[in-house]
Image: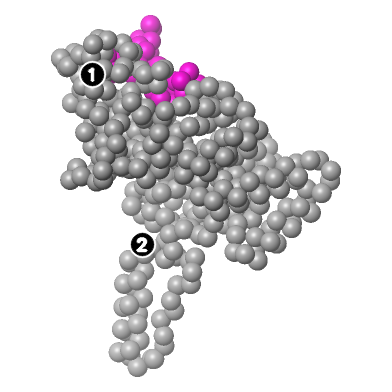
Amino acid sequence: MFRPGDWIEVRSKHEILQTLDKDGCLEGMPFMPEMFAWCGKRMQVFKSAHKTCDTVFPVRSRRLERSVHLTTRCDGSAHGGCQAGCLLFWKEAWLRPANGPGADNVAIVAPPVSRLSATAPSAAAPAGCTEADVLRATQIPAADGTDPTFVCQATRLPYFTQDLNPFDPRQYLRDLLSGNVRPWPWLRGLIYITYRNMINLGIGWGALLRWIYDRFQALIGGIPYPRREGVIPLGEPTPSGELGLQVGEWVRVKSYREILATVNEGNRNRGLFFDAEQVPYCGGIYPVQKLITKIINENTGKMMNMKTPCIVLEDVYCRSRYSDCRMFCPRSILTYWREVWLERVPAPETARLEQAHCAMDGVAAGVGKSVPQPAQGDALTRRPAA
């Protein structure tokens, strides 16, 4: 079994095709056309995928075996340009151990798969699977000629996984022993979920326990209790606050209190849910990675076009620190942000240059004032303390 940090090499295209059925699947898990770009590449295992979260049916925990996550996200080039950027699942049968990095180290995002063609010839596996079969399996044409239904690892996830009782303690021990979670975050997570269960007992002490939680976190520089309701009544409009952000610009995530003022009592702003997993990023500074305008609905397989782009920030994703019944899930789903939850700030290098320029001006003018330096956790710090 591969562990996080292990070096692997993705097997060749021919070897992988030999493992697939006519629908491009192994044990029900699709091998998607976007994944061919990594054949023959070396990289490190990111997480053991011994469990995951199902977002097709009511959100729940699921179990699977002999699978891992690498630092590879789907670019959607074979799925109508879907921008969800899902972390890909890899069966261990598609990988082999490697001694270390090679000259072909890879980036996180694969190149597009435009070279693939549903009619192009390719090497066939003994079972009859070809590249064209893998590409064909990505969608089901609609009988009436409307938009197709897309098929991918996310839409098929319930069918290559098994039920997992969220109260089964063995999964959490495996999270630790597999190397997915380090000892201190693991212990901290278990303390949090125990405390949350106390709050949810319904004995009237919830408000007091949340206050104690906040006071303790303030003393140690932690984050406040991450599951609170927004202040806008259900049915009332929520603000937009458009900034016109572009890829590469830098933003500061507003404080948790400021964001709660923009969401309703269901924690939604114009339909987009603000989740507890986003709270640790409040106050942090990040570059805009991409603007999301269309994603595949995992429940229906249909492409959804967004009226207003959602923002994805660099290295900002669900770390499953506060997810009910899904603690330590390794799926690392990208989090979406409304512009009203963000504020534009100068890029760190620009800020440093401006400070240096001000310092030189001050010396030249004989002012003798010192240039204030950023304190820990302010605009020049990418992430707030967790």
Q: Quadrant of the N terminus?
A: top left
What amino acid is labelled 1 in the image?
Glu
Residue 68 located left or right of residue 202: left
The answer to whether residue 364 is above or below residue 314 is below
**Number of the label disc, if any, that sits on residue 347:** 2
Q: Which residue shows up at 23% across the image and 11% down it?
A: 126
Q: Is residue 80 visible?
A: no
Of badges 2 and 1, the one in the foreground is: 1
Residue 43 located left or right of residue 49: left
Which segment did they paint magenta? 133-160
- At mark 2, the secondary structure is loop
The answer to whether residue 268 is above or below residue 15 is below
Q: CA distance from mark 2 to mark 1?
A: 43 Å
CA neighbours of label 2 inside 10 A, class few (<14), some (14 to 19), many (20+): some
Residue at the bottom extreme? 366
Q: Position of residue 211 (x, y in %)?
A: 74, 56
Q: What secondary structure do most residues of the magenta stretch adopt?
A: loop
Q: Is residue 3 magenta?
A: no
Residue at the top extreme? 143
Residue 346 located left or right of residue 340: left
Q: Quadrant of residue 41?
A: top left
What amino acid is labelled 2 in the image?
Ala
Q: Position of residue 365 (x, y in %)?
A: 33, 90
Colour logic: one colour
N-term-proximal mark, 2 vs 1:
1
Tag 1 residue: 131
